[in-house]
Image: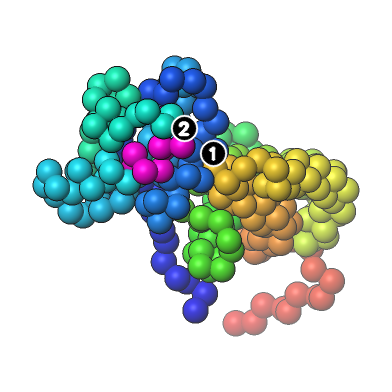
Amino acid sequence: TIFNGFKYGVEFSGGRSYIVRFDAPQEGEKLREALEKEFGSSPVIKTYGSSSKFDITTDYLINQEGLATDQQVRSKLYAGLKPFLGASVTEEDFASTKYIEQTKKVDPTISDDLQKGAIWATFWSMLVITLYIFIRFRDWRYSVGTIIALLHDVIVTLIVFSYFKNIVPFPLEIDQHFIAAILTVIGFSMNDTVIVYDRIREDSRLMKGEHSHVIVNRAINQTLSRTVMTSFTVFLTILILFLVGGEVTRGFAFAMLIGVVTGTYSSIFVAAPMLVDLARNKPLGKSDANATPAKTDKPQPALTK
């Protein structure tokens, strides 16, 4: 099937978090690879003030409670980090505050709040963009076309993410990096759409009375090279990040690659045709007060009683 559901990151599914101190600076990527072998899933690892202190969060046994479960998770954590701690550090030493400075659990209720916050962030960004487009172009049709194109980009990115979840050899999780990628894609796609729409508005003033599809086609041709070259440059930059950026940023880069492609063609093949459809009854560049029907090549039939 095309849609295979989503795998949520620790931020949205809940997990146990540990602030771990090491005697020497460590590399987060190596710690993550070692812990992934123990936990069976990729933990979230962030530096905590210095390169010798890390915030490690895992969803291992998140649905189980009790002291025995906490001990089991801590034992897995110790087994994964043992090569970086030194041979003299025992599991009892590791459990002390010298190495584990703080332990906390991210409950599913908190994760639900984070999910709602991410959804609201996307919603408010869409609303602000709608208002911005309306104020800039003074025409609600431009706002509708932009929002439909942005929704298209977000939905396609989600579907592709879900489809490749069990295919690609790296994790594709809905986490804070994915939300950042979605918001970035929204901004990128909106910028592309505004460039095309701005040219359509200018051409509609210069070609008053012309068919809407002629105006839109001309505007697309005038902005096509700029759109393709800009998007290609961004795509290459993100592709480099995807190839050499490491496992942590790979999901973010993958979502961005999808978004750049969808954002590029949606500004041409979604936003622009939508504007043509909305301009059937009111030509582009006309206000409601002085709107006149667009010219047609066919003679209009005579009115009969």
Q: In terms of depth relative to the viewer, which is nearer, 241 or 231?
A: 241
In the picture of the structure, the residue carrying the numbered disc 1 is: 30
Q: Marks 2 and 1: in contact by CB < 8 Å?
A: yes
* Residue 129 appears in the rendering: no
Q: Residues within 10 Å of mark 2 (few under 14, many from 20)?
A: some
Q: Report the predominant secondary structure element of the magenta stretch.
A: helix
Mark 1 or mark 2, which is nearer to you? Answer: 2
Residue at 21 percent of width and 54 percent of height: 63
Q: Residue furthest front?
A: 88
Q: Which residues are magenta?
A: 77-85
Q: How is the image coloured?
A: rainbow
In terms of image quadrants, where is residue 70? top left
Give percent across and percent down for residue 119.
Answer: 38, 46
Which of the numbered marks, if any, corresponds to residue 261?
none
* Residue 221 appears in the rendering: yes
Residue at 49 percent of width and 20 percent of height: 24
Give percent across and percent down for residue 140.
Answer: 55, 47
- Apparent side of residue 34 relative to residue 239 in the rendered image (left or right): left
Give percent across and percent down for residue 191.
Answer: 67, 40
Residue 155 position (above or below residue 59): below
Give percent across and percent down for residue 155.
Answer: 52, 60
Reply yes or no: does residue 78 show up in magenta. Answer: yes
SS at mark 1 in the image? helix
- Apparent side of residue 284 relative to residue 21 in the rendered image (left or right): right
Amino acid, disc 2: Phe
SS at mark 2 in the image? helix
In the picture of the structure, the residue carrying the numbered disc 2 is: 84
Residue at 40 percent of width and 37 percent of height: 82
Quarter in which the C terminus is drawn = bottom right
Marks 1 and 2, the one that precedes in the sequence: 1
Amino acid, disc 1: Lys
Residue 176 position (above or below residue 2): above
